[in-house]
Image (cartoon, rainbow, N blue to C red):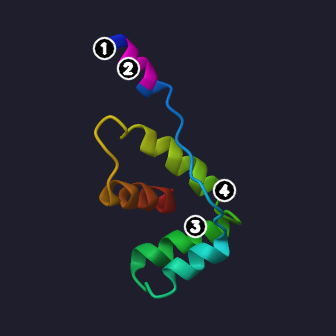
């Protein structure tokens, strides 16, 4: 059973539903003038959109599936992405 569970966790696919664009992200961050929001927005502008962020975020969050994904985990991963 342990091997099956490990296999399923290792091969689980994480994706995001719904449409999101740079403009939608700007809307979410519009009222947030904190350093984290500015840094993330700058990285998204540099990357010319959100596609790379979504791929990276899904890949990084996959590592947290067995322990749980929280708001804190997502924020930490977004900041690591913004700093890269």
Write the start and end of the magenta stretch as one range.
Answer: 4-8
- Vertical placement of 61 versus 28: above or below? above
Does 14 sit left or right of 64 as displayed?
A: right
Q: Position of residue 38 (x, y in %)?
A: 49, 78
On-image quarter of the N terminus:
top left
Tag of residue 51: 4
Q: Secondary structure at mark 2?
A: helix
Residue at 45% over, 59% down: 78
CB within 8 Å, label 1 to label 2: yes
Q: Position of residue 64 (x, y in %)?
A: 36, 41
Residue 6 is tagged as 2
Residue found 51% across the figure and 56% down from its top: 84
**Which of marks 3 and 2 precedes in the sequence?**
2
Q: CA distance from mark 4 to mark 3?
A: 12 Å
Numbered label attached to residue 43 = 3
Query: Is the residue marked by circle 4 packed among few (<14), some (14-19), or many (20+) residues within 10 Å?
Result: some
* Snapshot quadrant of residue 48: bottom right
Give the label, 1 or 4, closer to the camera.
1
Q: Are marks 1 and 4 in contact (CB under 8 Å)?
A: no
Give me the C-alpha separation between circle 2 and circle 3. Answer: 34 Å
Residue at coordinates 47% horizontally, 61% vertically from top-left? 83
Left of 22 or right of it: where is 13?
Answer: left
Q: CA distance from mark 3 to mark 1?
A: 40 Å
């Amino acid at each position: 059973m342990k091997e099956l569970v490990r296999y399923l966790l290792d091969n689980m696919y994480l994706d995001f539903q719904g449409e999101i664009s740079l403009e939608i992200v700007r809307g979410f961050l519009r009222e947030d003038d904190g350093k984290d929001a500015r840094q993330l927005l700058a990285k998204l502008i540099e990357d010319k959109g959100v596609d790379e962020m979504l791929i990276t975020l899904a890949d990084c969050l996959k590592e947290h599936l067995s322990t749980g994904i929280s708001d804190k985990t997502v924020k930490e991963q977004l900041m690591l992405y913004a700093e890269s």
